[in-house]
Image (cartoon, grey):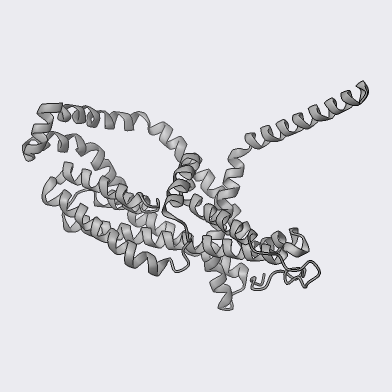
Amino acid sequence: MSAADVFRWAVAGSCGIALVGLTLAAVWSVRGILILVLVSLFVAVSLDPAVRWLVRHHVRRPYAVTIILIALLALLALLFVGIGPPLARQAGQLTADLPGHIQSLDDRSRAFRELSARYGLGDRLNDLAATIPEKVGASLLSLFRTFLGVLAAALTVLVLSLYFLADMPRLRRRVQLLAPDRHRERTRRIVDVVVDKVGSYMIGNLVISAIAGVVAYAGLLVLDIPFALPLALIVAVTDLIPLIGATLGTAVCGVVAAVASGVWPAAVGIVVWLLIYQQIENYVIVPKVMKQSLDMPALAVLLASLIGAGLLGLIGALMAIPIAATVKTVLAELREPLPPEHGPHPGGSDHGPPGTDPV
C-alpha cells in the first residue's frame, strides 16, 4: 500500500470518527427533547388499549382519542379541585406542626426519651424540623420555576402523546414494513406483544396504585392520624415503584404517625393495616388486574427499576420494566426459526398487519 493510499484511508477514518462525534454531540444537546418524545410514545402506548376498546365498540379512532383525552383531563381537573386545596393545607400543616410534634415525643414516649438521652436523637430531629420552614420559604422561587418547567414538559408530552395515539395503527404498520419480507410477520408479533403488554401493565399499575391510596387514606382516617391526604398520596405514588414502593410508603406513614400521634395505636395500627393490604394486593388484586402482566423475574424487575430510576427518576422506574420486558420479548422471538425463504410471508402485504385498528 502506497503512502497516498494510507493518507486517503487516514482521512476517511478521521472524517468518520468526526462524523460520529458530531452526531453524538448533537444527540446529547437535544437529549431533553428526545426524552420527552420517548415519554410521549410510552404514554401513547399505555393509553392505546383504552382507545382500541372504544374502537372495538364502533367508535372511530379520532373520536376515541378525543374521548380518552377529555376523560383524562376531567380526571385531572377533579383531582386538582377535590384534592388540591386540602392537600396543600395539610402539607402546610405538616411542615408547620412537625417541630412541635417532635418536641412532644419526649413526653409521649419513654423509648424515645431513652434514645434521645443516649444518642441525642431528639436534638437532631428538632434541629432538622426547625430548618424545614426556612428551607421551604427560601426555595419557593426555585419551586415555582420548577413547577413552570414541569408544566411545560407535561403540556409537550400531552400534545406529542395525542399525535402518537391518533397515528398508532399507522406507526405499527410502518414499523412492520421497515422489516424485510421474511421478517415482517415476526416484526408484527413483536410490535403487537409490546403494545399490548406495555398498555396493560401501565393501566393496571395505575389502577392498583389508586386502590392503595384509597385504602391508606381510609386507614389513616380510622386511626385519626393527621395529614391523611398527603400520606395517602405518598402511598399511591410509591406503590407505582415495583417491589420496594409499597414498603417505602408504609415506612413513611409509620414514621409520620409515630411522630404526630404516637407509636401505639396509630403507628403500629397503620403499619399493620398497610402490611395486610400489601398481602391482599400481591395475592388477590395484582393477579386479577394484571391478567396480561409482564412475565419478568423479581431480580430483573428490581435491576430494571433501579437503572430506570437512576436515569429518569420515578418515570424511569415505571418505564424500565416494560422496556426490559420488550427486550425479553424480542430475544425470545429471535430464537424462533424463520419461515422458509420462498414460503408465504403473512406480514408481507402492504395492507398492514392483521388486527390493527381502522383509522
From the viewer's perspective, is 269 left or right of 160? left
Is residue 336 shown above or below 237?
below
The residue lying toward the viewer, choosing from 196 and 151, is 196
The residue lying toward the viewer, choosing from 261 and 198, is 198
Q: Is residue 64 visible?
A: yes
From the viewer's perspective, is 56 left or right of 201? right
**Residue 214: image x %, image y %?**
30, 60
**Residue 263: image x %, image y %?**
13, 46
The residue lying toward the viewer, choosing from 41 and 89, is 41
Q: Is residue 69 visible?
A: no
Is residue 124 shown above or below 243?
above
**Residue 136: image x %, image y %?**
32, 33
Q: Quadrant of residue 174?
A: bottom right
Q: Quadrant of residue 59?
A: bottom right
For the point 15% across and 26% down, the residue is 120
From the viewer's perspective, is 129 left or right of 36? left
Is residue 12 shown above or below 338?
above
**Residue 111: image x %, image y %?**
9, 38
